[in-house]
Image: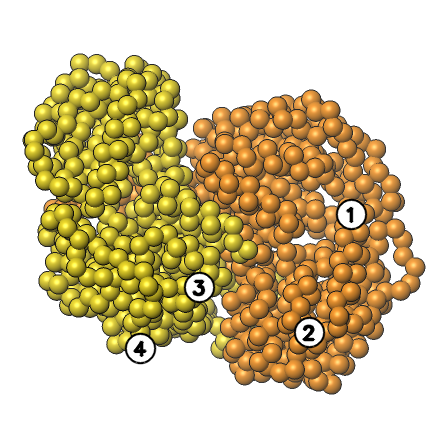
Chain colours: A orange, B yellow
Amino acid sequence: MITGQNHIGFERSAKGAKLFKTFNPKLNIENSIKFHEASSEEIDNAVSLAWKAFQSYQNYSGERKGDFLNAIADEIEALGQELISVYCEESGLPEGRAMGERGRTMFQLRTFAELVKKGDWVNAHIDTAQPDRAPLAKPDIRKMMIPLGPVVVFGASNFPLAYSTAGGDTAAALAAGCPVIVKSHPMHAGTGELVASAINKAAEKTGMPDGVFSNLNSSGIEVGVQLVQHPKVKAVGFTGSIKGGRALYDLASKREEPIPVFAEMGSVNPVVFLPEALKERGDDLAKTYAGSVTLGAGQFCTNPGLLLGLKDSNLEQFVNTLSEEIVKIEPGCMLHPNIIGAYEMNKGKALAQQGLQMVAEYDQEVGANVARQAVTTVEGDTFLQNPALHQEVFGPFTMVVQCKDKEQLEAIIFKMEGQLTGTLIAKGDEASAYPGVIEALKNRVGRIIFNGVPTGVEVCPSMVHGGPYPASTDSRFTAVGINSIKRWVRPFSYQDWPDSLLPDALQNENPLGIIRLVNNQLTSESI
Amino acid sequence: MITGQNHIGFERSAKGAKLFKTFNPKLNIENSIKFHEASSEEIDNAVSLAWKAFQSYQNYSGERKGDFLNAIADEIEALGQELISVYCEESGLPEGRAMGERGRTMFQLRTFAELVKKGDWVNAHIDTAQPDRAPLAKPDIRKMMIPLGPVVVFGASNFPLAYSTAGGDTAAALAAGCPVIVKSHPMHAGTGELVASAINKAAEKTGMPDGVFSNLNSSGIEVGVQLVQHPKVKAVGFTGSIKGGRALYDLASKREEPIPVFAEMGSVNPVVFLPEALKERGDDLAKTYAGSVTLGAGQFCTNPGLLLGLKDSNLEQFVNTLSEEIVKIEPGCMLHPNIIGAYEMNKGKALAQQGLQMVAEYDQEVGANVARQAVTTVEGDTFLQNPALHQEVFGPFTMVVQCKDKEQLEAIIFKMEGQLTGTLIAKGDEASAYPGVIEALKNRVGRIIFNGVPTGVEVCPSMVHGGPYPASTDSRFTAVGINSIKRWVRPFSYQDWPDSLLPDALQNENPLGIIRLVNNQLTSESI
């Protein structure tokens, strides 16, 4: 049941005077429940409790943390239809998407549970002593990853489950041994509260310390600002706009003790279509991309907002087919009136730029908050000269840039801001004639895709979801996959430490049976 | 031969009007050579050349980069006695130290050469496709580490070789595939120029691209500021003061595209002496610590500046012996008049605080720039209440804090700023009675040492040299050991990429024979 209260550890609390409601974009009405924005006192309580919880939770075994993560997945599943219904009411997204995203969320939790139960992730390194080494004896040094401290997670508007309350950031931080305080997304505060109750139920059932998780409601920026500035908060995870992510990064860097902010932000996800591929299967590609651009009403961070090709008849034909195909697709309801408002405004701003042509836009009657998908084109010269055209239009919008030659194509990619993904569409070994294009793409993105679509982010160890700024604030980390745990941990060395006082992962006997780098050799043997 | 010129890639250049000289602290006179500070144009040339070099160097094989690094070590050795003499003239440090540090520098270079020749460090992950997976086919995704781009390295005043021109930061960045621009330290510009010439000689001999390395002279902050703000610089390494490191961090965070700054800064390296240990061998410990505090005139980042114990007769005896022993040691010449000036000023500031007692100070006549080592004491209550006493006094200075009980000891550690190291001195299993002290230390440091001294930083995979702020600006990385390469790289994914276009590290056949995580199993087999 949704109460509109905050979760401060295991307690519920509603001391704040500021109230807000979520919105049903499909029905175009406010939902009924009133949420209490967290007060300054409640924020401080949540962080202090997280700090206290950290003192014990940081040393919990992988087995215990894994049980907790699996229990969260179970409790989310046990929320049943209520969660699915509230998700749909607050997002306008269809039930199938809700079910799929719930499955992904549970998969992420269970994947991290498996990771920490297995235990190798701590990256244990052991260099044994050489007391007789000349001129100086070599000490025994052992290293492993340990958690940073309380982590604040900002939920994403476009993933109410998989990148919000119990999403990837939270799962990774809890797996690392960091308590989590979620600043709940105001657009899906009810979904957030349900998931928060599942997390705390799981925490109580599996004997986790009070404060290992808190969920704070907020409708403006105040709660987030206070959280990021709190001295006991040690890291921040964010998924959202460049403006929002950068503001948090700036706040965190100005602290007396700066803390890491991993913000996954905007991206137009350039796709390069090489001429032979367009010649061979331009129509199929156009159909595929009409689907990719409009998937989830274009509300994916990997949405292909920029299509690049060499100006010729094949590209022209591709644009024609893309235009025909995209208007056949039933337009989708966006998450919130603010989001569709921003979509229409940014689309308008782009079209106000000289040289950008609208070539297709859905023109049938649509319901409230439903986004009309659009295809635009522009010449390479114009695009190169006008940075306003490089801005993301978040939603079912794409821009086809017609480059005059290979050199211009390379120049455009080189000039682009950092991106989550880049895609190359080529026929056979056509790609090998474009080494400059591939190198340029590699320099600007976190993931390159061959003959595919950027939408769809597989959760696996090899995935990089992140990239050069502003795709993310620190390209050295990924927000998806098991390695995302690295955002919340630091290496720690023990020198000549007695075996009995070492954590299990570093003891001679290797009681966890994990793989360790011992004197430069990977092994799971004991010492 | 030292010319006073800058190295802009393979060219020498001296366009700047600003000249400066280095200083011989032992003789207390300026050295004769005039160095040309890099002009704004020269800085831009160096970065542009580095950017151009990056386009090819980033793809050089581990074998080639390893040859380059080994050649640098060879060329540094080939500088022979000239390097040792200039080092001593510019630092006042003894010849033995110069030789030792040269050895360490060469060892670091050769260690990174071995690392990149072996190749496993790229952390290759492969998840093969599952075309039949329901509901969605799983793509083939492969990930490895790739370099960030040109890196700026600020040399450390206290390590003219091992943490300067061809020191740990440079070796790690070149190994990663990043060109390096060194902002040479003004106090040892001659040593820097000699080493720079060795690096560029090695680069030419091994066929590296022009611009893979540049060395810029500077006497003030302007060169560093321009470098950190340059859009084509992608990361910064720094070793030095909190003030300097923080200033660079702030500049980098305010850029349109923020970049990572790894600054290794101040630390007082707390040492906790438990009572039984002091009772058993307090005199030996006092002798050992008299040596550690004065080693290298106290000019090590791991110098033990804060000694903590429970107030009793054993601690009193320890302080007495430490006082007697420390004044027996011949005082050392500091690196520069500015550094001894700061030492005396900071010592004076500390002693001006109420409650800090001077219990021993070297009082014989000393030469110019020679630092008088000092031992001070303070009550735990006083220390807890006065943050001015927590500041580092860089030099041969230490403060013994007499805590009234175990709880106060814990409280003091909890309140400390982040540190590079923490040390616990205990007898037998005495330590197991102090879990709170150990936990508190763990939270504040990057490395904990048992029954040893913090000075001496072993170069090995298990070493962490870094720690919570302000020990470093990002505790998630180390500045020493092979893992320090992680500061300069980012993960990068290839999705469904053709085998022939993949880098060697990710190809099916595994031509490099490296260890990879393939479908969650570590293996060096081909696919």
Q: Which residue is mark 1?
A: A338
| Picture coordinates of residue A386, whole percent (x, y) | 67, 68
Name the element at disc 3. loop
Cα distance, mark 3 to mark 2? 28 Å
Cα distance, mark 1 to mark 3? 38 Å
Instruction: Say whether mark 3 and mark 4 are on the same chain.
Output: yes
Nearest to N terminus: mark 2 or mark 1: 1
Q: Is residue B178 left or right of residue A471?
A: left
Instruction: Say whether mark 2 and mark 3 are on the same chain.
Output: no
Tell me if label 3 and label 2 are in contact, CB under 8 Å. no
Tell me, for residue B479, which label it has, or none.
Answer: none
Instruction: Please state the chain letter of the residue tagged with numbered disc 3 in the rendered image.
Output: B
Cα distance, mark 2 to mark 4? 40 Å
Q: Which residue is mark 2?
A: A382
Name the element at disc 2. helix
* Amino acid type assigned to the residue bearing label 3 in the image: Gly
Q: Farthest residue in the right direction?
A: A365
Q: Which residue is mark 3?
A: B149
Instruction: Please state the chain letter of the residue tagged with numbered disc 2 in the rendered image.
Output: A
Which residue is at 58% across, 34% downward?
A227
Which residue is at 7% across, 31% downward?
B364
* Amino acid type assigned to the residue bearing label 1 in the image: Asn
